[in-house]
Amino acid sequence: MKENHKSFVTLTAEERRKLVSDSIEQISKDYGNTILSDSSRNEFLVKRMTDLADRTVWAIGQQLACGTFAPDQFEAKFLIDAAQLPQGQRLAMQGKIDRIDICEDEENVYVKIIDYKSGKSDFNLLNTYYGLKIQLIMYMKAAMELEQKRHSGKNVIPAGILYYNMSDPIVELSTGEAADEDTVLYHIREELRMKGVINENKNILKKLDDTDSVSIAVPLAYKKSGDVDERKSRVMDTAHFDMLEDYVLQQSGRTAEQIYNGKVALNPYADGEYHSCKYCAYKEICGFSPDLPGHQFRKLNKMKDPDVWEKIREEITDGKKLD
Ligand code: SF4
């Protein structure tokens, strides 16, 4: 797309399909033309992958067309200095951000990060508080540092941390709805709307999606009065983005310090049906078994978001006092 000066938004359906099938063909060749085309089953898998990739590229174009953000970096590698530990060591974090979109004005660069997922991921404040889902907050810090280097002299402002859950959905129409292509595609866009949280600043919301009703790109909906519909939107202000970043960095530093000091006790958590051992690669050797005496899953206290924010605020303040 870059070579041909095409963007997700300007790509025609024909160009998109050709790029997708060329890419899948290339991957198939990289596998030595065996794994992906040696049986009818694998041919079917290739077809499904092609359909999923085509649907994904289509949806990305539809979502970007709603606002004025554009992709700036793909698979952006980072290495950040995340925290200083008391013994003089430093905690470095490295990773790769699937996509960084930006939008600029004279003074500011707004940054939106997107993580592609094959499951159903969403932002969860409580999980972030417990340190279970800190990836996107860390990515935002890294993306802001990367963009600050590319746009020195401008303010870099967080606009959103978002998950694109990859799928090629089949949608159901309500009774009485017209079964035409436009209606079906609208519902598919709704299904593929990104999850996560975005900056509530009005100017930034307009740049993310210029709608005055319900966004099909980001978690945003307006009431008839023109106010953001809090029940159907997921928004927070820049101060809260900053607070989360401070908190995650502080907690990561503390965790690193504890690991460095030898705290590696078996202490898995359970949340409903899910527990941290479920997909753990070490479960055959670590020796934890909930049937053994003294081996219990840690239960996490449930809290409402305002209480979680209060806790986060307290812990940052305590941490700063300690520093
Ligand atoms: S299987 Fe063992 S190492 Fe893995 S999460 Fe559970 S307790 Fe921890």
Image (cartoon, rainbow, N blue to C red):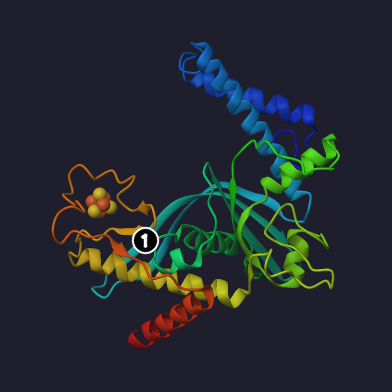
Q: Secondary structure at mark 1?
A: strand
Q: Answer above or below: position of 106 versus 6.
A: below
Q: Is residue 243 left or right of residue 293?
A: right
Q: Looking at numbered disc 1 in the image, what kind of residue is underneath it? A: Ala
Crowding around mark 1 (Cα neighbors within 10 Å: few <14, some 14 to 19, many 20+) is few
Furthest-left residue in view? 293
Viewport quadrant of the N terminus: top right
The number of numbered badges drawn on the structure is: 1
Furthest-front residue in view? 175
- The residue positioned 50% from the left and 11% from the top of the image is 39
- The residue positioned 37% from the left and 88% from the top of the image is 321
- The residue positioned 59% from the left and 64% from the top of the image is 148
**Residue 148 can be seen in this image:** yes
Instruction: Find residue 231 and report its horizontal and vertical position in percent.
Output: 67, 67
**Residue 61 can be seen in this image:** no
Q: Quadrant of residue 285?
A: top left
Residue at the disc numbered 1: 92
Q: Quadrant of residue 157?
A: bottom right
Q: Is residue 95 left or right of residue 61?
A: left
Instruction: Find residue 232 and report its horizontal and vertical position in percent.
Output: 69, 63
Q: Is residue 43 left or right of residue 133?
A: right
Does mark 1 have its CB less than 8 Å from ligand 1? no
Viewport quadrant of the C terminus: bottom left
Instruction: Find residue 221 and report its horizontal and vertical position in percent.
Output: 74, 63
Q: Answer above or below: position of 75 versus 239.
A: above
Instruction: Find residue 165 and report its horizontal and vertical position in percent.
Output: 58, 45
